[in-house]
Amino acid sequence: MALTRALVAITVAAGVATVPAAAAPAFHGGVSPLTAAVKKRMTPSVWRPGCPVPLNRLRRVLVTHHDFRGRTRRGVVVVNADVAQRVLRAFRLMYDAGVPIRRMRPIEAYGGDDFRSIEADNTSAFNCRAATGSSRWSQHAYGRAVDVNPLENPYVSGGRYLHTMSDHCRSCWFRPTERVGERACPFTTLYWDFLIRHEGTLAGNQRMTLQVRNLGRLGPAERAAISQRATAIRAAGGAPPRALTLL
């Protein structure tokens, strides 16, 4: 539950405009098995024999959500039964926080085509496919991954990844590879602080094996320094304290 709340907080902090919760009707949601008609629609574009999860292990999660115009909508994602209640809680928290979702349609509405779904900024979950650039099953094939607003799609990363994937760090005084110290990148500090605070939950996620292993290499003193600096950054409203930026 703590990780769910943290992920919702990141979604809100990513710059997506929120809808005032007081103005919205109450949240409604539920979990149900797949009907025969739904199973037929999913086969074979989304599910087929040989997929790692049988259809009877999947569930539809129907939820209320805000759209980007402030209207209340209903949407559906299909997920593994073992995460369905957690996914429902996550969407309830996002709704209560006023986080908008463009649309939520099961991916068979797009013929099982991830790219068509992404181009529609569609929030979706189960799809029996390989991980991008790999022959291994994606977590979507297990029904344990949800892409929320894929054209906005907030996620957690450190400065090193930002530096590799963009020119965001090109003229920045901070060093994206450093976690602590006066020139440590705030993105990097906050990334490692997030891992530290949710280590117990993340350790149970096979997609986080490498990150948790790297986290285990940090000693108590460095962990404490990361947490202290992250607290100072958050206290400054997400920006590094003036003393840290040399401004």
Image (cartoon, rainbow, N blue to C red):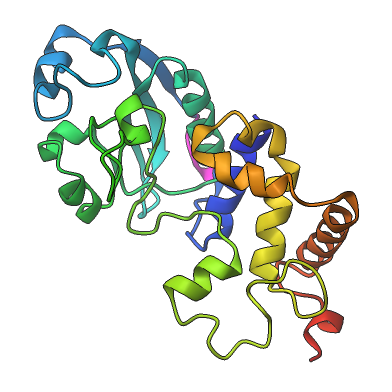
- Observer-nearest of 14 and 200: 200
Magenta-span inclusion, residue 23: yes
Counting from the top left corner in percent of width and height, residue 191 is at 65, 57
Q: Is residue 228 left or right of residue 195?
A: right
Q: Is residue 98 left or right of residue 47?
A: right
Instruction: Look at the image and tell me whether residue 77 can be seen.
Output: no
Q: Residue at x 78, y 52 (%)?
A: 218
Q: Is residue 162 left or right of residue 112?
A: right
Image position of 243 with respect to 155: above or below: below
Q: Residue at x 15, y 32 (%)?
A: 108
Image position of 52 with respect to 225: above or below: above
Q: Residue at x 47, y 55 (%)?
A: 154
Q: Quadrant of the N terminus?
A: top right
Image position of 104 with respect to 161: above or below: above
Counting from the top left corner in percent of width and height, residue 164 is at 47, 73
Q: Main secondary structure of the magenta part?
A: loop
Counting from the top left corner in percent of width and height, residue 33 is at 31, 9
Residue 42 found in image quarter: top left
Q: Which residues are magenta?
A: 22-26
Q: Residue at x 60, y 63 (%)?
A: 158
Counting from the top left corner in percent of width and height, residue 221 is at 90, 55
Residue 93 found in image quarter: top right
- Observer-nearest of 55 and 205: 205
